[in-house]
Every structure is written in structure tokens, then in C-alpha cells.
Image (cartoon, grey):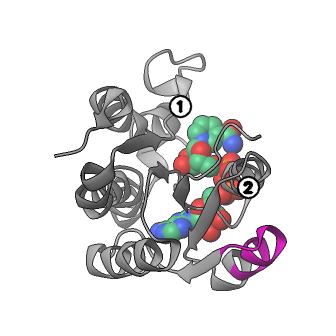
Amino acid sequence: MGLLDSRRAVVTGGGSGIGRATCRRMTEEGARVAVVDVNGDAAEQVAKEIDGLAYEVDVTDYDALRAAVDDATAKLDGLSTVFNNAGASNLSQVHDWPVEEWDRIVHLNLGGVFHGIKATAPHLMAGGGSIVNTASISGTRPRRPRRASWRSPRMPRTSTRRPSGRTRCRRG
Ligand SMILES: NC(=O)c1ccc[n+]([C@@H]2O[C@H](COP(=O)([O-])OP(=O)(O)OC[C@H]3O[C@@H](n4cnc5c(N)ncnc54)[C@H](O)[C@@H]3O)[C@@H](O)[C@H]2O)c1
């Protein structure tokens, strides 16, 4: 018997790294998983590995994410977990970032989490479930002062994680 038997999950950024490893582990523990990634080939590959569903979606596009979540919920016959993991950054100093890159990263790392919560909450509240967001220890405890650009977009994300991370969506 697995820890996640009968759970049904959506994992954003599931095509690579932490997201891919989480998709695999969740499946090993008995969950059925929908892999969401802006890289459609990567999402397909992981979905094939875990016998899951694949969605090529940019999490900064709320309507597209909502449509994928609704479709996955119908095909999986419910939703009990969302892992808002899609994100990116770079390690150059903050004053070297083009303004457009800052806007893109903040929209992705913060907006993507908000979109994930908003798109899944109605389904999670219908049957109970969990919201998990990837943040970074750098958001609360910076270790390298030069890396302001790495941690700055994560500070609000860490704040978002706290209340939502504790949230268990209950029936009704
Ligand atoms: N690896 C680390 O040391 C580290 C440290 C702190 C935080 N994080 C965070 O953990 C998360 C996963 O990191 P990782 O190391 O596995 O990175 P990764 O680059 O291996 O995986 C990120 C995945 O997100 C996907 N993605 C990127 N933009 C997207 C978008 N707009 N819509 C949908 N999918 C998108 C990518 O295609 C990729 O598959 C990220 O949010 C990252 O910021 C990672």
C-alpha cells in the first residue's frame, strides 16, 4: 500500500528536475499524476514514464492552466493535490537583469503559483486536498549577498507558500 493511494495530483514544471522526480515518487506511492510543463515534449516523456497525463501549458497563462486542470480533474476523476513547482531564475546580479527578464521571472515564480492555487482550489475544496508550492530557502535565509536576483523573486513566493502551504482544502 502506498502513501498516496487514491490521490490524484497536478504537478507544474513536472517535465524536469524536482518536478519530474516528484511525479515519479508520487506515482510510486500510488497517486495518478498530470504533468504540466511549458515544454510539451518533456511533459509527454515524464507522463509516459509514469503512465500519467501530459499538458503543454505555460503557467503564466491562467486560462490555459485552468483548462488543463479541469481536463485532468475530469480524466482522473477528481483532484486531491497540486504541486506548484514551475519556476526559473538566473544567478546574475540584480542590476544586470533586463527589466523584461525581471517581469518575466516575477510573473512566472509568483503569478504561476497564484494561478495554480486559483485554478485548483475549486476542485480541491470539493473533495478535500493539499496545495504544495516550491519556494526556496533563499527566500527567507539568504546565504550569498550577491545573489539578490536569485532570492528577490522568491521572497513573495515564500510568503505565498506559508499560508497556502498550511491550507488543507476541506469539503465544502
Ligand atoms: N534546483 C534548485 O536548487 C532550486 C532551489 C530553489 C528553488 N528551486 C525552484 O524549484 C523549482 C524546480 O526547480 P528545478 O531545479 O527542478 O528546475 P528545472 O529547470 O529542472 O525544472 C523547472 C521546470 O519548469 C518548467 N517551466 C519553466 N517555466 C514554465 C512555465 N512558464 N510554465 C510551465 N512550466 C515551466 C521547465 O520547462 C522545467 O521543466 C523551480 O521553481 C525553482 O525555481 C530550485
Count of numbered circles in the view? 2
User: Is the shortest distance between ligand 1 and the CB of mark 2 under 8 Å?
Assistant: no
Task: Determine whether, in the image, residue 22 is placed left or right of residue 172.
Answer: right
Task: Determine whether, in the image, residue 165 is placed left or right of residue 36.
Answer: left
Quick check: can you spot residue 73? Answer: yes
Judging by the rendered image, the residue that carries numbered circle 1 is 136
User: Is the shortest distance between ligand 1 and the CB of mark 1 under 8 Å?
Assistant: yes
Q: Could you say which disc has been placed on residue 27 in the image?
A: 2
Location of residue 36 with respect to 13 vertically, above or below: below
Task: Determine whether, in the image, residue 145 is placed left or right of residue 19.
Answer: left
Query: Which SS does the magenta portion mostly show?
Result: helix
Location of residue 63 with respect to 142 vertically, above or below: below
What type is the residue that disc 1 sits on?
Ser
What type is the residue that disc 2 sits on?
Thr
Residue stretch in magenta: 44-52
- Front residue of 84/2: it is 2
Residue 95 x/y as whole percent: 42, 44
Give yes or no for residue 46 being in the magenta stretch: yes
